[in-house]
Amino acid sequence: MSWLQTLSARERQAVTGGAILLIAMLLYLLAWEPLAEREQQLTTRVEQQRIQLAWMTSAAAEAGALTPRGAPSGNNDGTSLLSLIDRSATEAGLGAAVRRLAPEGDRGVRVWLGDAPYQATIRWLESLGRTGIHPLNVQMEHHETGGRIEARLLLGRAT
């Protein structure tokens, strides 16, 4: 810093003021601006999540409305519930979307759907309801591709 002492008082003030201004600009560009931008991104993401939650809530209500209680059982031929659900999903055009089927106790089957068409899934659940198989638990997530969902379902017979 010996070169700073060789400057006149006025020049030292100008250099010091420029250094302070440079530090302030660097703090703004390297800290404040990225934080403000990230906050804006997170605010936008929260709003998108709220919209998605509203969509899922209405979809859950719609799915619940499509499951009549006390529908007749369509399994009088001895076919297992797992086989009926697997066959009906394929017939409904959801065969490629079924990721996994697993028995859940005596009266239920867990179904995982990936990248499934929402409308086809609702129609499938409605047709299952007509055979006495009802959703006992439904979790749907809106897929980035419009009109498509990821779903985890617990399906079983009405007791």
Image (cartoon, grey):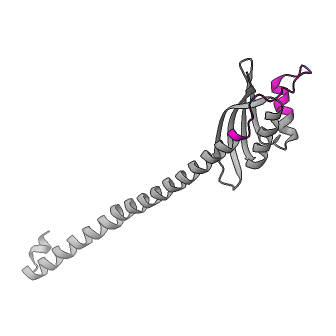
Residue at (76, 49) in percent of width and height? 119
Q: Position of residue 135 (x, y in %)?
A: 71, 32
Start-end of magenta stretch: 64-87
Residue 86 belongs to the span the image colors magenta: yes
Q: Does 144 sit above or below residue 24?
A: above
Q: Residue furthest top?
A: 106
Image quarter (top left, top right, bottom left or bottom right) of the C terminus: top right
Residue at (87, 27) in percent of width and height? 74
Residue at (82, 34) in percent of width and height? 130
Q: Does 34 sit above or below residue 84?
A: below
- Left or right: residue 138 versus residue 13 is right
Q: Position of residue 77 (x, y in %)?
A: 92, 21
The residue nearer to you, when weighing 50 against 134, is 134
Residue 34 belongs to the span the image colors magenta: no
The quadrant in which residue 86 appears is: top right
The quadrant in which residue 10 appears is: bottom left
Q: Position of residue 2 (x, y in %)?
A: 12, 70
- Left or right: residue 123 versus residue 138 is right
Image label count: 0
Q: Residue furthest left?
A: 9
The residue nearer to you, when weighing 87 against 9, is 87
Residue at (60, 45) in percent of width and height? 57
Image quarter (top left, top right, bottom left or bottom right) of the N terminus: bottom left
The secondary structure making up most of the magenta span is loop
The residue nearer to you, when weighing 41 against 47, is 47
Q: Residue furthest right?
A: 77
Q: Position of residue 142 (x, y in %)?
A: 64, 49
